[in-house]
Image: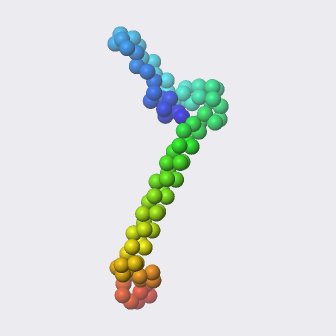
Amino acid sequence: CVRAGVQGQLIPPHANEIIQKQGAYHVLKNLWLTKGFWGLYAGVGPSVARAFLVSGSRFSSYEGVLWLCRWSGLTSAGESKVGEEGPGA
């Protein structure tokens, strides 16, 4: 990943050494030459898995609370949120 390559550059231990940082283009070029096209997608799998788990847990929580509200009588399945008369009034 280009961002990790730019951010992960080491700082020399001595203060008198010159820091020569590489730009995003140089890191991208080096990444392309060393790891190829798939090097650009390094780390995407865990991010997608995390998003899948987070979205699934949010959806499950929402559905659980919605079921609980309907079961307790706080709302019904066909209740309108616009008003008492409905959306056409």
The relative height of residue 70 versus residue 48 in the rendered view (above or below) is below
Q: Measuring from the top left, give residue 88's x and y in whole percent.
A: 44, 87
Instruction: Using the rendered view, name the quadrant where residue 87 is placed.
Output: bottom left
Residue in the image at 42% along x and 63% along y: 61
Q: Residue at x 55, y 26 (%)?
A: 26
Q: Horizontal and vertical percent for residue 8? A: 45, 27
Q: Is residue 25 visible?
A: yes
Question: Dividing the image into 4 quarters, which one contains the C terminus?
Answer: bottom left
Residue drawn where x is 40% and y is 78% of the image: 70
Whole-percent x, y for residue 69 in the image: 37, 75
Q: Quadrant of residue 62?
A: bottom left
Looking at the rendered image, the quarter that the N terminus falls into is: top right
Identify whether 19 is placed above or below 46: above
Q: Quick check: 85 left or right of 28?
A: left
Q: How does the figure colour the protein chain or chains?
A: rainbow
Q: What residue is shown at x 40% (from left), y 15% (from top)?
A: 12
Query: How many marks overall?
Result: 0
Residue 16 drawn above or below residue 35: above
Above or below, comparing residue 86 to residue 71 in the picture: below
Residue 81 is at least partly visible in this image = no
| Residue 77 screen position, x and y as percent | 45, 81
